[in-house]
Image (cartoon, rainbow, N blue to C red):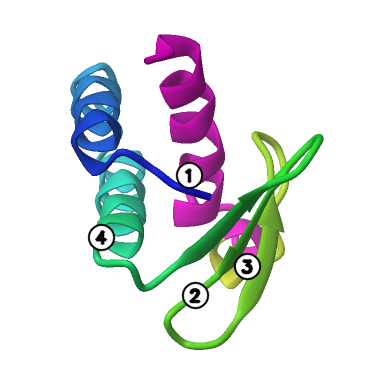
Amino acid sequence: MDINIQKFNEVASVAKASISDKRWQNAIDKCVAGVTSGWWVVTELAHCVAVSTEAGKFYRANEKHCQCEAFFRGQPCKHRSLYRLLALYNEMGN
């Protein structure tokens, strides 16, 4: 998936400013780092996003679920952040 980094950063900045939860803000920061660095390979699917990370791990995430350790510990996760940011990104259009 081709992501316009400038537009993605704008979406992330607005999203981050709209929440006060520091853990979600950190998840957004980690998500942005993964996407903008080119470390992650991102594929949008019908009801989720698939992410291959810099560590060679693969996750599928949507707004409610992820396969990562943070999710299973009940914490905000960067993969779910990615799903939501991409939804906002796509809503913006060109």
For discs 4 and 3, the disc positioned in front in the rendered view: 4
Query: Which residue: 49% across, 33% down?
Result: 86
Query: In terms of secondary structure, where does tag 3 sit?
Result: loop
Q: Position of residue 35 (x, y in %)?
A: 35, 57
Q: Which residue is mark 1?
A: 82
Please say whether residue 69 is one of the residues in the magenta stretch.
Answer: no
**Residue picked out by circle 2:** 53
Residues under labels 4 and 2: Cα distance? Answer: 11 Å
- Kind of residue at disc 4: Ala
Residue pictured at 70% horizontal, 37% vertical: 64
**Quadrant of the image occupied by residue 25:** top left
Q: Nearer the viewer, mark 1 or mark 3?
A: 1
User: Judging from the image, what secondary structure is the residue with disc 2 in?
Assistant: loop
The answer to whether 57 is drawn above or below residue 75 in the figure is below
Q: Which image quadrant for residue 67?
A: bottom right
> Along the line of sight, which residue is nearer the eye, 21 or 12?
12
Residue lying at the far right in this picture: please name it: 46
**Viewer-proximal residue among 20 and 62:** 62
Residue type, numbered disc 2: Thr
* Element carrying mark 4: helix
Residue underneath mark 3: 68
The residue lying furthest to the bottom in this view is 55
Of badges 2 and 3, the one in the foreground is: 2
Q: Residue at x 40, y 12 (%)?
A: 92
Q: Would residue 16 appear left or right of 67 to someone viewing this image?
A: left
